[in-house]
Image: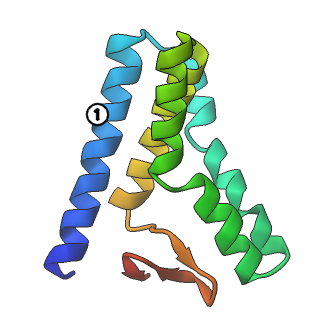
Amino acid sequence: MRLVQFLLRLEGVAIFAAATWAYFALIDGSWIAYAVLLLAPDLGMVGYLRDTRWGAVTYNLVHNEALPIALLVGGLVTGSPMLIGGALILGAHVGMDRGLGFGLKFPESFKHTHLGTF
């Protein structure tokens, strides 16, 4: 593994850890909700049932770092603990995926990601 890929994966682990800590320590989140919702973003792979182009689009819409940040800001502005919790769980999921080496997808292949090919 190259240094840049290692650093990107390490960054993902840090995001996963920080989002998980914040969910439980700062908003006293539910373990059940966390367990159920942590893998829910993988429903974004549904586009792969059509083809790899659609799959990459639907996957990347859910698995980017901008979406949980936007949800977190929205939750903080509105004071919505549910939105904040969802944002932290989504952020944890994205970090977990990055830590495991699953990056944003290119339309050529499910295995072709911004972190390399797995």
Left or right of 52 in this view: 60: left
How is the protein colored in the picture?
A: rainbow
Q: How many marks?
A: 1
Look at the picture and state if 22 lies above or below 7: above
Write the residue at 55% across / 75% down.
Answer: 105
Residue linked to disc 1: 18
Look at the picture and state if 39 lies above or below 7: above
Q: Which amino acid, by three-letter code, is at mark 1?
A: Ala
Write the residue at 45% across / 38% down.
Answer: 69
The residue lying toward the viewer, choosing from 73 and 81, is 73
Query: Where is residue 51, by image quadrant?
Result: bottom right
Q: Residue furthest front?
A: 77
Quarter of the image for the N terminus: give it. bottom left
Q: Residue furthest right?
A: 50
Q: How far across and how far down the image is residue 30, in percent?
A: 53, 14
Task: Look at the image and tell me whether residue 112 can be seen.
Answer: yes
Query: Where is residue 20, by image quadrant?
Result: top left
Task: Look at the image and tell me whether residue 34 can be seen.
Answer: no
Look at the picture and state if 61 lies above or below 39: below
Write the residue at 31% across / 43% down.
Answer: 15
Quarter of the image for the C terminus: give it. bottom left
Q: How far across and how far down the image is residue 85, in percent?
A: 52, 22
Secondary structure at numbered mark 1: helix
Q: Residue furthest bottom?
A: 108
Q: How far across and how far down the image is residue 34, in percent?
A: 53, 27
Look at the picture and state if 45 lies above or below 112: above
- Are there few (<14), some (14-19), or many (20+) residues within 10 Å of tag 1? some
Left or right of 10 in this view: 23: right
Q: How far across and how far down the image is residue 83, in percent?
A: 58, 22
